[in-house]
């Protein structure tokens, strides 16, 4: 049984001799096996062998009754420490596959406790020197810029942390990419991808996703509700054919950078302001006419709205942009839908008819922070973008579109046109 990992050998006697014994982890191959029968080893005793690039034949340590302690508190992180009795060394393991490490330590336990009956059930081969591939550090970065270099039959290296595939004419996201558990940065810009997968697969660590200059027309809502909701920090969708954003994009709680330049967007989601960590936002060269009211809640470093069609004709703070959209009492559907959102009732697509599920996704938020679907009124006022960003590219003002849920909120807004946040209910 073999395990590829980083190993740092620590001699416990060095400090007692006034020596620091500094060392650096190196890529090694650990193996548990038998050294073969001999006069001194008639039963083929079990050994632990540590092989490195400098010593492929390996250093062997007898296991039976030679293990003082095994530290496995951080086994889920691929870390463990083996404390030997003779020689007085600690074998510090890191960057190992957690599942393989668990199996390795299970066999190791049988070896140092001398449980021959259980060891007989485990196939342990004779120890042999490690190959070059077994002691090489796994590839963590891969760049593919030509179609001919793209792997067709073989899999991508399991330990990849950064993958860049540009200009290869991909029409979809390769399912093999979705199996890369350690991937943190994925760049698929400059291809012909028309749709992103609904499920990111095992990309639970993905922090950076670039799919600029493709043929995307929509962003799957389920993708924003997956594991990417907490891991994704940089999303680049520039140069596609997106016409709208799903409301679920506002659930990407860790998003720091968002680039949607050169698309066909006409608006942003109503609760765009929920992206509280967003610091850099570019929506240049789109068709956006108005921003959602929640946009005022953001605090960013840089915003780019150049090439859009904002129209700011009123003086800032004016209430002249008010427009009544509803008379009389709200419908029963409206009252029930508002209650579901206000009380944060959880529901899934399986719980409701499709038209009701879609209706609940169209929620709008009043200046009082209350939900509404058929607003009592709406208002549009100019907004100074310097209030939400230090650096601006393009216009310095943009119209803000807000919704009003009731006559009470309408009267409050008319009384405080320069401070709409005062309209929020206590």
Image (cartoon, helix red, strand yellow):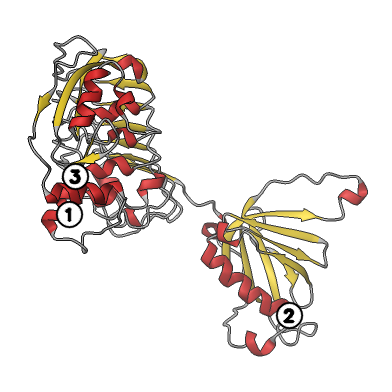
- Which element type, helix, strand or loop, lies under badge 2? loop
- Residue 77 left/right relative to 295: right
State the residue position of label 2.
Answer: 113
Q: CA distance from mark 1 to mark 3?
A: 29 Å
Q: Nearer the viewer, mark 1 or mark 2?
A: 1
Query: Is label 1 in contact with label 3 (beta carbons under 8 Å)?
Result: no
Which residue position is annotated with label 3? 193
Which residue has dot 1 on it?
Answer: 357
- Classify residue 392 by image quadrant: top left
Query: Do tag 2 and tag 3 residues touch (Cβ < 8 Å)?
Result: no
Q: Which secondary structure lies at badge 3?
A: loop
Q: Is residue 4 left or right of residue 318?
A: right
Give the CA separation, mark 1 to mark 2: 59 Å
Question: What secondary structure is found at the residue carrying circle 1?
Answer: helix
94, 268: nearer the viewer: 268
CA–CA distance in space, label 2 to label 3: 56 Å
Asked which quadrant contains residue 40, the reply is bottom right
Q: Residues within 10 Å of mark 3 (few under 14, many from 20)?
A: many
Quarter placement of the N terminus: bottom right
């Amino acid at each position: 049984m073999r395990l590829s990992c980083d190993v740092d050998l620590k001699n416990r006697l060095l400090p007692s001799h006034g020596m620091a014994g500094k060392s650096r982890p190196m890529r090694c191959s650990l193996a548990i096996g038998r050294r073969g029968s001999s006069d001194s080893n008639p039963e083929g005793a079990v050994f632990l062998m540590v092989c490195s690039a400098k010593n492929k034949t390996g250093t062997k340590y007898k296991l039976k009754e030679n293990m003082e302690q095994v530290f496995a508190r951080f086994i889920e992180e691929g870390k463990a420490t083996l404390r030997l009795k003779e020689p007085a060394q600690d074998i510090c393991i890191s960057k190992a596959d957690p599942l393989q490490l668990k199996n390795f330590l299970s066999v190791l336990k049988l070896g140092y406790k001398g449980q021959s009956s259980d060891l007989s059930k485990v196939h342990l081969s004779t120890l042999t020197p490690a190959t070059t591939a077994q002691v090489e550090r796994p590839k963590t970065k891969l760049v593919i810029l030509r179609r001919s270099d793209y792997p067709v039959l073989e899999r991508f290296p399991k330990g990849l942390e950064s993958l860049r595939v540009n200009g290869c004419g991909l029409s979809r996201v390769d399912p093999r990419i979705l199996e890369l558990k350690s991937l943190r940065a994925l760049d698929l810009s400059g291809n012909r991808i028309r749709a992103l997968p609904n499920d990111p697969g095992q990309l639970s660590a993905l922090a950076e996703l670039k799919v600029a200059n493709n043929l995307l027309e929509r962003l799957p809502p389920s993708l924003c509700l997956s594991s990417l909701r907490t891991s994704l920090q940089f999303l680049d969708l520039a140069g596609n054919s997106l016409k709208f954003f799903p409301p679920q994009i506002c659930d990407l709680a860790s998003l720091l950078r968002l680039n949607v330049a050169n698309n066909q967007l006409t608006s942003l989601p109503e609760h765009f302001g929920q992206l509280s960590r967003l610091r850099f936002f570019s929506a240049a060269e789109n068709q956006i006419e108005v921003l959602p009211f929640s946009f005022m809640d953001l605090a960013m470093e840089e915003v780019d709205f150049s090439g859009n069609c904002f129209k700011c004709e009123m003086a800032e703070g004016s209430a002249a942009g008010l427009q009544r959209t509803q008379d009389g009492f709200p419908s029963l559907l409206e009252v029930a839908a508002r209650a579901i959102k206000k009380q944060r009732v959880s529901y899934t697509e399986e719980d409701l008819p499709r038209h009701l599920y879609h209706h609940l996704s169209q929620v709008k938020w009043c200046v009082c922070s209350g939900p509404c679907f058929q607003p009592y009124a709406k208002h549009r006022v100019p907004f100074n973008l310097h209030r939400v960003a230090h650096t601006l590219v393009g216009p310095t003002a943009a119209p803000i579109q807000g919704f009003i849920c009731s006559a009470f909120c309408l009267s409050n807004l008319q009384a405080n046109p320069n401070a709409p946040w005062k309209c929020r209910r206590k």
